[in-house]
């Protein structure tokens, strides 16, 4: 069985054939970095949050997904 990262990369390569393999590899690493930082820092936001605006994991996913998708799909 292939490691999950290899399978994920393969799926991305199929979905984004216009992105060269080495560029896609680094973009995937940038995504992993953004995800791991977000998970680690979820309760340590130094920026004052508006009162009543949640900053739980579900809200962060809604903020992070478009950012990650744009980075993966960006033209060369």
Image (tube, helix red, strand yellow):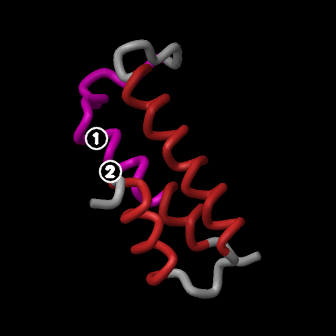
Q: Identify the image quadrant of residue 72.
A: bottom right
Q: Residues within 10 Å of mark 1 (few under 14, many from 20)?
A: few
Q: Residue at x 52, y 19 (%)?
A: 47
Task: Report which residue position mark 1 lands on.
Answer: 59
- Name the residue rendered at 60%, 47% in the picture: 30
Per the image, label 2 sits on a secondary structure element best described as helix
**In this view, 2 is above or below 16:** above
Q: Is residue 58 magenta?
A: yes
Specify the farthest residue to the bottom. 18
Circle 2/circle 1 CB separation < 8 Å: yes
Which residue is at the front of the view, 22 or 54?
Answer: 22
Where is mark 2, residue-wise? 62
Q: Callout 2 environment at 10 Å: few (<14), some (14 to 19), or many (20+)?
A: few
Q: Relative to the observer, which residue lies in front, 13 or 65? A: 13
> Tag 1, which secondary structure?
helix
Q: Which residues are magenta?
A: 48-66
User: Residue most toward the right?
Assistant: 76
> Residue placed farthest to the front in the image?
1
């Amino acid at each position: 069985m292939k490691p999950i990262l290899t399978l994920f990369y393969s799926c991305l390569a199929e979905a984004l054939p216009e992105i060269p393999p080495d560029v896609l590899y680094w973009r995937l690493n940038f995504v992993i970095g953004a995800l791991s930082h977000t998970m680690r820092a979820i309760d340590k936001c130094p920026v004052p949050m508006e009162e009543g605006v949640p900053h739980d994991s579900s809200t962060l996913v809604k903020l992070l997904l478009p950012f990650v998708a744009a980075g993966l799909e960006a033209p060369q």
